[in-house]
Image (tube, grey):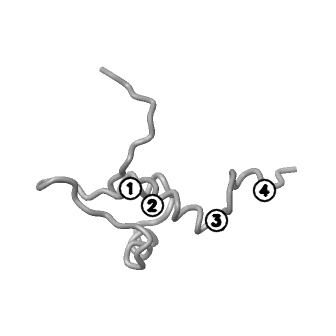
Amino acid sequence: MVTLNIKPATLDREGALMFTGLSEQELRRHEKDGYVVFKPLGPNGKKVCPVAQLENLVKMLWDIKEGNPLEDMDFG
């Protein structure tokens, strides 16, 4: 078995939910609003969304300009 330690280019809906931490309803709302687009790859492909779109959605939701959101949090 080969294991690759690279980030995938796309995720299916289940992966997108895990990646973003959003609920199914929230993700569908952002899809309806055009922030993310799920479409099938290939003639019989599973619907997937580019990870870059999901990253942009998370940045928008956190209002992240740059860097790591945890850097701005004071934990003590």
Q: Can you tell which mark lies on residue 74?
A: none
Q: Secondary structure at mark 3?
A: helix
Residue that mark 4 sits on: 72
User: Residue most toward the bottom?
Assistant: 33
Q: Earlier in the sequence, mark 3 or mark 1?
A: 1
| Residue located at (38% from left, 55% from top) | 50
Q: Earlier in the sequence, mark 2 or mark 4?
A: 2
Label pair 2/3, CB-CB below 8 angstroms: no
Label pair 4/1, CB-CB below 8 angstroms: no
Cα separation between marks 2 and 4 = 23 Å
Q: Secondary structure at mark 4?
A: helix
Residue 51 placement (x, y as % from top left):
43, 53
Residue 11 placement (x, y as % from top left):
36, 51
Residue that mark 3 sits on: 62
Report whether 35 appears left or right of 60: left
Residue that mark 1 sits on: 50
